[in-house]
Image (cartoon, grey):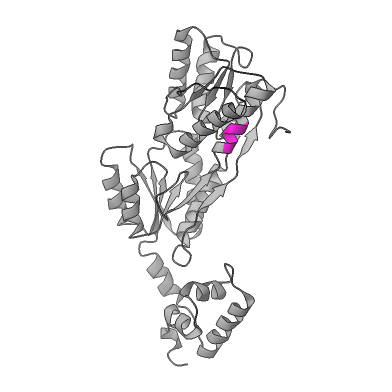
């Protein structure tokens, strides 16, 4: 066919009587298509001599050949792991990464809107941008919420939080028989922390116990954990266990209490969430929840990179309870037997 090189995927889909997405799936060998539909599309492709213009498709999908990544800040190993996972996927596709740190300024949304004009897709850490702005952005380019949830149909890639924190808290309540537990973290500042706080409360309810009504509010940096340790020491009486919303805070609490002569886990139990590398290197090693930090970011990048042919979709990645010495167990390990 003389004009086959000028045929678009939309024309091919019309001739085959299927959707554009179906033609793309059959030609690229991706996604789920029935055998009957696949044969129908293949016969139509053969009959019309259709060949997609890969160069034109790439240019249309990636005008800037750049993917944006929006964080509130970059301090600490958690964000470092996310960046590595994201960047590796993007660079392998021969694209570039632009990173914007909003530092939660009042003009954060305006900064992100400006950045969106210079990228082909946008990954936004949960809680960094308002829902209204996310909806506005999603009308102009592919948007995926990383480690959080987005409004409406905006896709999100996140790790399981609620059940993992419930399991960790249940371990402390049932295996170790602890009753006076506090949660350290600010549920209002992050969808992830909110889910972990709810998991903490669920474990208490399931054990027919009443949890403390309010968490000890703190940011997620190690220095914030040190400050929490100082505040608890000033009160004079420590709780039996300090359940932190993330590892960096837990490591700060650990350093602060050990420096004051408090024994862990003999005098107080400390736990975290994330399983950053340092969690297994400190003494005592930190009981925590392992989430696939790099894979969260890598999957987010993959979805944005193929958004030109396949719309991003929600993914919930599994987490794993990791038992170590800081909760009072004799030896390190992974998920305990029920």
Total marks drawn? 0
Query: Which corner quadrant holds the C terminus?
Result: top right
Where's residue 99, x and y in %?
A: 38, 47
Residue found at the very far right of the displayed protein: 337
In the image, is residue 305 above or below residue 200?
below
Residue at image coords 29%, 51%: 113
Q: Which residue lies at the image location 62% right of the left edge and 18% below the top edge?
A: 178
Residue 287 in view of the camera? no
**Residue 243 drawn at (x, y percent):** 54, 24
Residue 38 appears in which quarter of the rendering? bottom right
Main SS of residues in magenta: helix
Q: In this orientation, which residue lies closer to the viewer: 46 or 179?
A: 179
In terms of depth relative to the viewer, which is nearer, 172 or 140?
172
Verify whether residue 199 appears in magenta.
no
**Quick check: 149 above or below 25?**
above
For residue 158, say whether it is visible.
Answer: yes
Q: Nearer the viewer, residue 104 or 194?
A: 194
> Which residue lies most toward the front here?
208
| Residues rendered magenta in the picture | 163-167
Residue 119 image offset from top left, x and y in percent: 35, 57
Q: Residue at x 46, y 27 (%)?
A: 185
Q: Quadrant of residue 279?
A: top right
- Residue with the most extreme top position: 236
Residue at the farthest bottom position: 2
Compared to residue 231, the image places residue 69 above or below, namely: below
The correct choice, above or below, for 97 with respect to 12 in the image is: above
* Position of residue 122 in the picture relative to residue 48 (left or right): left
């Amino acid at each position: 066919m003389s004009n086959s090189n000028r045929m678009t995927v939309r024309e091919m889909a019309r001739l085959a009587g299927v959707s554009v997405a179906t033609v793309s799936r059959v030609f690229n060998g991706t996604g789920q298509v029935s055998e009957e539909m696949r044969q129908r599309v293949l016969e139509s492709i053969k009959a019309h001599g259709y060949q997609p213009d890969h160069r034109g498709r790439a240019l249309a999908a990636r005008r800037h050949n750049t993917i944006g990544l929006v964080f509130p800040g970059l301090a600490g190993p958690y964000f470092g792991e996310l960046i590595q996972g994201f960047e590796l996927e993007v660079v392998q596709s021969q694209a570039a990464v632009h990173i914007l740190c909003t530092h939660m300024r009042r003009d954060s949304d305006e900064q992100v809107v400006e950045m969106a004009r210079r990228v082909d897709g946008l990954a936004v850490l949960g809680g960094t941008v308002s829902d209204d702005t996310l909806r506005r952005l999603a009308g102009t380019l592919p948007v995926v919420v990383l480690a959080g949830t987005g409004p409406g149909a905006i896709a999100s890639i996140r790790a399981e939080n609620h059940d993992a924190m419930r399991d960790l808290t249940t371990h402390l309540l049932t295996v170790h028989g602890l009753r006076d537990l506090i949660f350290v973290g600010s549920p209002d500042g992050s969808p992830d922390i909110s889910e972990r706080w709810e998991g903490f409360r669920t474990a208490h309810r399931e054990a027919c116990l009443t949890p403390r009504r309010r968490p000890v509010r703190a940011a997620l940096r190690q220095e914030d954990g040190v400050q929490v340790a100082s505040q608890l020491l000033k009160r004079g009486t420590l709780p039996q266990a300090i359940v932190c919303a993330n590892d960096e805070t837990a490591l700060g609490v650990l350093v602060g209490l050990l420096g004051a002569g408090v024994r862990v886990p003999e005098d107080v139990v400390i736990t975290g969430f994330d399983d950053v590398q340092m969690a297994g290197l400190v003494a005592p090693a930190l009981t925590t929840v392992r989430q696939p930090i790099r894979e969260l970011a890598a999957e987010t990048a993959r979805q944005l990179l193929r958004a030109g042919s396949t719309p991003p979709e929600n993914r919930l990645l599994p987490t794993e309870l990791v038992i170590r010495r800081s909760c009072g167990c004799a030896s390190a390990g992974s998920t305990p037997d029920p």
